[in-house]
Image (spheres, rainbow, N blue to C red):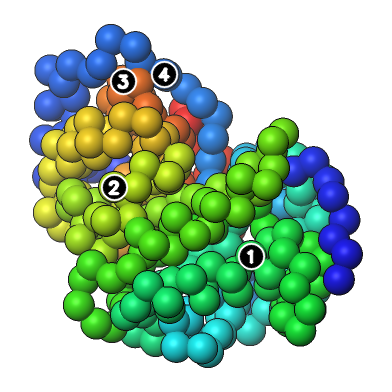
Amino acid sequence: MALARRRPATLPVFLSAFLYAAAFLAGPAAAMGKTGNVFVFWGRNKDEGSLRETCDTGRYTYTTVIVSFLDVFGHGRYHLDLSGHDVSAVGADIKQCQSNGMSIFLSIGGFGGQYSLPRRRSAADVADYLWNAYMLGTRAGVHRPFGDAYVDGINFFIDGAAGAWPENYDELARRLWDYNKGYRARTPVQLSATPRCGYSDRRVERALATGLFNRIFVRFYDDPHCAAHLEQEWDRWTAAQPHAQIYLGLPASERKVGYVHPKNLHAVISVVQKAANYGGVVIWERYEDKRTGYSTYAIQWA
């Protein structure tokens, strides 16, 4: 199949402590400051609206949308879970998003346990599948769920996988990155990861050690320890991955641990921006963001 080539209120205790500490936190000298990057996860609730709607209504807010999840892989079986969205419509939506200047990533993994890479051969097979089913590969006989549309990168969201950690995600990263060698003026496979905030998250530790991930979306939610020690964990990530852009992962829902009230966002973001490799903000997730409008506040400071 030939592919079209296009351009690619009252502060909680933990937050009070964080803001107090912010006044004394010294960042690297070469601070990056505001980047304007706000990413969002899409595909977790059918009522969030289509991908096209997400890109059209968020074109002045989002810079990248992360389609989630490819939640089954590693044993010769593959399954894409988009929470009831019409998969056949996603390809045209991807093209529309990209025409608006947005990037689209496909996130693999998620919170389930039906994926793993027990052998290096498993990693090679999954890399081959991702390249040919979702990216620029053209191998005959491989079903392309999004038709001739392609995603701009792969996101490793390795959270609930079965088996012992760490598995062969480092091998998967190398295999995927190898596809870039045939291209000089572009990088068709961009790699990102979404680890838990407690450094260094053994699930993706070996993969990140390859140095091939240029974006790391650290999840500062769903973990009371990290919510209470955000600045310490942030410093550990930014120091350990100096060549990657580190993104602050925040929930759009006030019901999640780690939620930062919009009126406190500036104080929090201004601290993490002191890191030279600060990248932006990643919102979990589109349905809640649509309900609360959280990204419209984040973009003011990101």
Q: Does 23 appear above or below 144? A: above
Q: Is residue 38 visible?
A: yes
**Residue type marked 2:** Ala
SS state under label 2:
loop
Q: Earlier in the sequence, mark 4 or mark 1?
A: 4
- Mark 3 / mark 4, whichever is N-terminal: 4
Q: Secondary structure at mark 1?
A: helix
Residue at image location 61% in from the left, 47% down from the top: 180
Q: Residues within 10 Å of mark 3 (few under 14, many from 20)?
A: many
Q: Do the residues bearing badges 3 and 4 touch, measured as CB atoms within 8 Å?
A: no
Q: Which residue is label 4 attached to?
A: 32
N-terminal label among 4 and 2: 4
Alpha carbons under labels 4 and 2: distance apart: 23 Å
- Which residue is located at x 34 percent, y 78 percent? 119
Q: Badge 4: how crowded within 10 Å, few (<14), some, or many (20+)?
A: some
Name the residue that disc number 1 marks.
131
Relative depth, front residue between 251 and 202: 202
First in sequence, mark 2 or 3: give its number.
2
Who comes first in sequence, dot 3 or dot 1? 1
Residue at image mark 3: 274
Is residue 153 shown left or right of residue 114?
A: right
Q: Nearer the viewer, mark 2 or mark 3?
A: 2
- State the residue in front, 234 or 175: 175
**Comes first in the chain, label 1 or label 2:** 1
Judge from the rendering whether residue 143 lies leftward or rightward of residue 161; answer left or right.
right
In the image, residue 234 lies at what x, y percent? 23, 37
Residue 35 % position (x, y): 51, 26
> Which structural element holds mark 4?
loop
